[in-house]
Image (cartoon, rainbow, N blue to C red):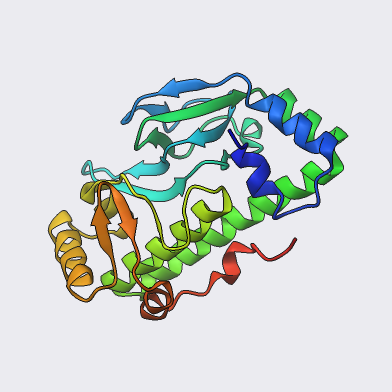
Amino acid sequence: MSNPLTLKLEHGSKLTPGDRQRLDALIQTSCRIEAGQDLIRENDPPEHVRLILEGFVCRYKILEDGRRSIIAYLVPGDICDLHVAILRRMDHAMATLTPCTIVFMAPDVIADLTTNYPRIAHALWWSTLVDAAILREWLVSLGQRPADQRLAHLFCELLLRLQTVRIADENSYPLPLTQEALADTLGISTVHVNRVLQQMREDGLVVFRDHRLIIPDVEQLKEFAGFDSNYLHLDGM
């Protein structure tokens, strides 16, 4: 099995064989967690850094009226908050959206990586900056893009992020997310999500088959979404 963290970080730094060996050692002990489980709740003290090896995880906030707002997706190769132990408590929650395989790392492991492996440290900072760039792009989508372009933009983003860790091929990837999760991500109702998806299917922009998203014409979907991949910073290495 390929190490998704290594596959991702190689876009942020030129790793040595020793670096790859150290990253491979990180994934030797992992936990399997079912879908719909909180990894950490808002106001909990953060004690571990989480590395996603398989599955989809989301960051989310719960509003006073009980509505959920998903504010990020974490996919294989992603680390949940590199320096989270600096904080006394969480300001948001994280939960599994699908069955997941996750590595729980103590803060001293992160300290070792950032102190003794300079190329890994450089790549981890790159990853942190990309996380912030993704958040900015999501804010643009929520503030300015209509719902259909918002969803198309998300589909394009996930294609590239999953291609990076060899989960997506040139025009398709597994997408086991519910319409409820998409609604909580886009800030619209599930009825609206269903309507947008139906229209995108009718327009030939997307096809769903066996929990897999197929994009018949990737360039067409990117043009429809106004998608520019520069914020993912995947061309550095």
Looking at the picture, how far across and down is residue 134, in whole percent?
Answer: 52, 59
In the rendered view, would you say 15 is above or below 112? below
Residue at 80 percent of width and 29 percent of height: 112
- Residue 92 location in percent, x, y? 44, 39
Where is residue 186? Give x, y as percent.
Answer: 31, 59
Taking the spot 27% from the left edge, 69% from the top edge, the residue there is: 147
Q: Nearer the viewer, residue 219 or 67?
A: 219
Residue at left 44%, top 62%?
A: 138
Q: Is residue 50 visible?
A: yes
Q: If the image is split into quadrants, where does the N terminus sit?
A: top right
Residue shown at the point (65%, 56%) measured from the top left: 129
* Image x and y of residue 146, in percent: 29, 74
Q: Is residue 210 above or below residue 149?
A: above
Which quarter shows the C terminus?
bottom right
Viewer-side residue, 135 vs 155: 155
Q: What is the total number of numbered labels drawn onto the structure image? A: 0
Image quarter for residue 214? Answer: bottom left
107 left or right of 133 in image = right
Asked if residue 114 can be seen in this view, the reply is no
Q: Nearer the viewer, residue 203 or 158?
A: 203
